[in-house]
Image (cartoon, rainbow, N blue to C red):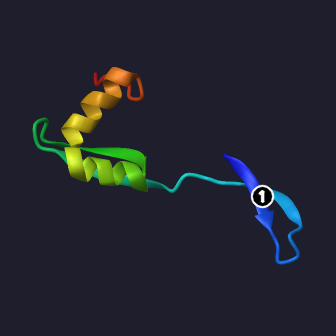
Amino acid sequence: MSGNNVSHSKKRTKRKFYPNLHVKKFYIPEEDRWVTLKVSSAAMRTIDKKGISACMKEAKEKGYLEPSR
């Protein structure tokens, strides 16, 4: 996503907005293993709300994750 930096004098210069990404390990008790995911802060809140298993199932259905081998 892009936008503008706006100075005090209202002069605009282009800038980019980047997602707030983190590399985080999550434990999946059903599979008794840890997985490492690169997720945004919003995704971490969703995982806390729904649970890691539900989020990974939804991501696989949408094609965001490759199916486990």
Q: Residue furthest bottom?
A: 8
Give the residue type at disc 1: Asn
Q: Quadrant of residue 22?
A: bottom left
Horizontally, residue 52 falls left or right of residue 44, namely: left
Residue for point 23% across, 43% down:
52
Horizontally, residue 14 falls left or right of residue 43, namely: right
Residue for point 78% across, 58% down:
4
Q: Position of residue 49 (x, y in %)?
A: 22, 50
Q: Quadrant of residue 62?
A: top left
Horizontally, residue 41 falls left or right of residue 1, namely: left
User: Where 7 falls versus 46 (above or below)?
Assistant: below
Q: Quadrant of the C terminus?
A: top left
Q: Which residue is mark 1?
A: 4
Q: Residues within 10 Å of mark 1 (few under 14, many from 20)?
A: few
User: Where 57 falls versus 45 (above or below)?
Assistant: above
Residue for point 89% across, 67% down:
11
